[in-house]
Image (spheres, coloured by chain):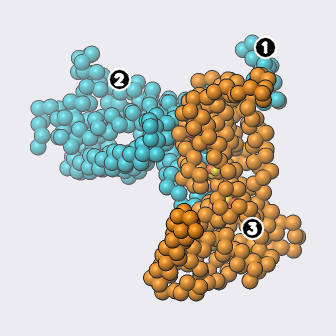
Chain colours: A cyan, B orange
Amino acid sequence: MSKIDINGDIVESLTGTTIEKKKSRIPARLDFLQSATGLILALFIIFHLIFESSILFGKDSMYAITKMFEGEFIVKDGSPIFISTLAMVIFAIFIFHAFLAMRKFPSSYREYLRYRTHAKLMNHADTNLWFIQITTGFMLFFLGSIHLYIMMTQPQNIGPFASSDRIYSDLMWPMYLMLLVSVVLHAGVGVYRLIMKWGWFDGENPRQNRIRTRKIIKIVVVFYLLIGLFSLASYIKIGYEHRVDYGKRYSVNMGDK
Amino acid sequence: MSKKEEASLEKQEQNIENAKEIAQKRDMSIDEGREITIRSFKYDPSNPNSKPKFVDYKLRETPGMTLYIALTKIKATIDNDLSSDFVCRAGICGACGMLVNGKPRLACKTLTSNFESGKIELLPLPTFKLIKDLSVDTGTWMKNMSLRVNSWIVSKEKTDISKIEKPVEPEVADEVFELDRCIECGLCVASCSTAIMREDFVGAVGLNRVARFQIDPHDERSDEDFYELIGDDDGIFGCMSLLACEDHCPKNLPLQSKIAYMRRKMVKV
Ligand code: HEM
Ligand code: SF4
Ligand code: FES
């Protein structure tokens, strides 16, 4: 680091402006990155939950998708390394997003008291949505980390039987249930707020757009909760039936029973 | 009597008829309405002996009664020590903001008949300095906000009042006038969770003001100049888009879209 940089930080921390007596551009970058990381995670979740619910179409579909993500089209039989790399990238974005978004949490007793009392008194729809956003965001700190760490370290344990064993026999389903609900709500509210925040589809009539956006997001959130819950239920069912064969792997010729 | 006066008189009579009809439906006579209870916060921070408390006032509702009228009646007949602010009684001056059953509203634009239960709880606007009871100091806050965002036209051009002003496209002028309708009531600030938590947040009113000058062709400031005013976490980047400002502004200003507009401009600087 050059001397100039250090002096710059000192000047800004003492005076609130850069050496050129300008406001720092960092807050703008942080605001942008907070939204960008949130959007990337939301897009990821949109696809992830669809792929994961392939189990609803039978074990073979889920197996095919797993193999696809293991890069079967690149290396023979695929390799779990692709999955653990993907998990690592997502984990990095996830940590960065949490780091940025954390700035918005109420951070003292007095801030929390003022915010919460006011929100309860006012009972305003979008202000209530934000409470869901920060609560689920807080939950995701832990739930998301557990899930991503397992995907990074045991990428080979994904598949119709492996996943089901983990969910049922390894007693991961309560964690997945909470993860599912919190991530879907968090991403749904987050994307709605992103659209409002940047005025993406404001068009001629922003108020109309807001009503429409809320409606669409509500439908999408319910859809994702439903497919998520049904898939989780089917993993639990498979895991239960497979409990005596715990650890045995699935292969295509086993077919769908 | 002119045709116009006649029509106006007829309209007035019609209004009285309507009021009577509503009154009858509600099972009350024109001057003898249902009993309503107004519960008001009372506290005088300047008096060391004063303790914060809530006081219930029971009174008869009259047709078309606003909270302004109800409070005036309370002050005249029950408690002359109750403080609250008013100037215009017509939703123009922005002096009468308060929390009405938790929601920021103008007392002079709020009908008591909107409250089915007949129970109305009044609190002073949060985020502003409490003067007494329902009266808060929005004036000092607004003055500071105006100074902070340099709420005036900045132009190097010398004004020559003997010449006609530079013309402005009508659509642009309309847009500027639309944002100029702000009455500085402070309801947007009092409804904002960011403002509640972070004292120095500039608020929707301040961001709207900057947008107003950003749009105005008379103003020569660049986006870089505006960034110097609101380019930080107490300014545009502090806004969390909870939109309570948009939903409570009594003037229906397009706050969501204008804040988003300023954010797009400022993030590109
Ligand atoms: C897969 C996981 C996640 C997804 C899909 C996601 C998505 C989003 C999106 C789209 C936003 C809106 C961004 C913005 O307003 O600029 C957001 C905001 C937020 N996120 Fe996340 N997020 C995730 C994980 C987390 C985690 C782990 C935390 C933990 C701290 C978190 C905390 C927050 C908070 C507090 C906000 C509100 C920020 C604000 O109001 O400006 N999120 N998230
Ligand atoms: S923007 Fe609306 S709510 Fe805010 S001060 Fe102006 S008129 Fe009042
Ligand atoms: S008294 Fe002027 S706005 Fe209510």
Type of amino acid under label 3? Ser
Expressed as whole percent of the image width and height from the top left, the position of residue A36 reads 50, 30
What residue is rendered at 78% in x and 19% in y? A20
Q: Which mark is residue A34?
A: none
User: Which chain's residue wears label 2?
Assistant: A
Q: Which residue is mark 1?
A: A3
Q: Position of residue B189 (x, y in %)?
A: 66, 51
Callout 3 secondary element: loop
Name the residue tied to disc 3: B84
Circle 2 is placed at which residue position?
A82
- As shown in the figure, which amino acid type bears the numbered disc 2? Phe
Q: Nearer the viewer, residue B87 or B214?
A: B87
Task: Classify mark 3: residues with Cα within 10 Å, few (<14), some (14-19) or many (20+).
Answer: many
Q: Chain of mark 3?
A: B
Distance of label 1 from label 2 (alpha carbons):
42 Å
Q: Marks 2 and 3, how far apart in space?
A: 67 Å
